[in-house]
Image (tube, rainbow, N blue to C red):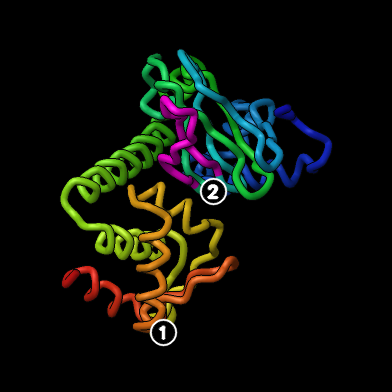
């Protein structure tokens, strides 16, 4: 069961998490009190569904801590992973349209999750009152839509190895800064099966290609982290496969 304003986390800790988000980090103390975001703060335990097979779902969520798995159920009852999103990102009705989510589910993934949730109507009122927040939100949604478009183009135009290499490069850019040597270290919360679902491939094929990349010293994959010894070398691999 989702908890709103749970006692397991102090008020100061909740405020710090909320204000660390790109959308909220520029507001004044007075604006922050006016928005009352703590009243919209919820927590979900590992494996708990934020929503499941949602239709006419009228909420927008900002991830403050943890990861969310977005997916749907196919006609045979299998879960299909569409996206795994991280701290600072938005999900739910992020286009602010009151349509259904086509049977989509959202689940706390690998660990407990902290969220800030808004009804669409309340968030639209907020955007009208706070143009700075509206601009930041528009940029975030634009970035999300570009990522969705790029994933679709990759599925249509690239082979599995190219899609997998592109996936690791995108993760490196999004989740870590390169070191002086060009190495990238990415905290890992994904299995081979997770990655296969995200790039539209079989788990066996993903495992085979990861093994090949490791043999070529282009990648090191463990349960804790993904290490790319040279992002530039991996990018060159992307251009030739």
Tell me if mark 1 has few (under 14), some (14-19) or many (20+) residues whose alpha carbon lies within 10 angstroms of its own.
few
In-image side of 27 versus 3 (left or right): left
Percent of width and height locating residue 48: 66, 34
In-image side of 173 versus 27 (left or right): left
What residue is rendered at 69% in x and 35% in y?
43
What residue is rendered at 75% in x and 44% in y?
12
What residue is rendered at 36% in x and 79% in y?
218
- Asked whether the viewer can see residue 151, the reply is yes
Against 150, residue 101 (above or below) is: above
Tell me the quarter of the image containing the N terminus.
Answer: top right
Looking at the image, which is closer to me, 82 or 150? Answer: 82
Q: Secondary structure at mark 1?
A: loop
Give the labeled residue for mark 2: 87
Give the labeled residue for mark 1: 180
Tell me if mark 2 has few (under 14), some (14-19) or many (20+) residues whose alpha carbon lies within 10 angstroms of its own.
some
Tell me the quarter of the image containing the C terminus.
Answer: bottom left
The magenta segment is: 68-85
């Amino acid at each position: 069961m989702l908890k709103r304003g749970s006692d397991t986390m102090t008020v100061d800790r909740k405020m710090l998490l909320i204000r660390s988000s790109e959308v909220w980090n520029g507001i004044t103390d007075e604006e922050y009190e006016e928005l009352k975001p703590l009243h919209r703060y919820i927590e979900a335990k590992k494996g708990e569904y934020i929503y499941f097979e949602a239709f006419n779902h009228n909420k927008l969520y900002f991830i403050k801590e943890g990861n969310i798995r977005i997916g749907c159920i196919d006609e045979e009852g299998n879960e299909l992973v569409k996206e795994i999103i991280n701290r600072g990102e938005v999900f739910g009705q992020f286009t602010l349209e009151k349509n259904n989510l086509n049977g989509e589910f959202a689940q706390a993934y690998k660990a407990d999750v902290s969220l800030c949730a808004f009804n669409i109507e309340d968030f639209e009122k907020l955007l009208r009152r706070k143009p700075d927040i509206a601009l930041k939100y528009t940029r975030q949604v634009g970035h999300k839509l570009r990522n969705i478009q790029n994933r679709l183009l990759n599925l249509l135009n690239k082979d599995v190895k190219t899609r997998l290499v592109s996936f690791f490069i995108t993760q490196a850019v999004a989740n870590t800064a390169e070191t002086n040597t060009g190495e990238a270290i990415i905290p890992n919360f994904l299995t081979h099966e997770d990655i296969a679902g995200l790039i539209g491939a079989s788990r066996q094929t993903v495992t085979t290609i990861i093994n090949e990349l490791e043999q070529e010293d282009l990648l090191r994959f463990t349960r804790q982290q993904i290490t790319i010894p040279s992002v530039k070398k991996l990018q060159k691999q992307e251009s030739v496969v």
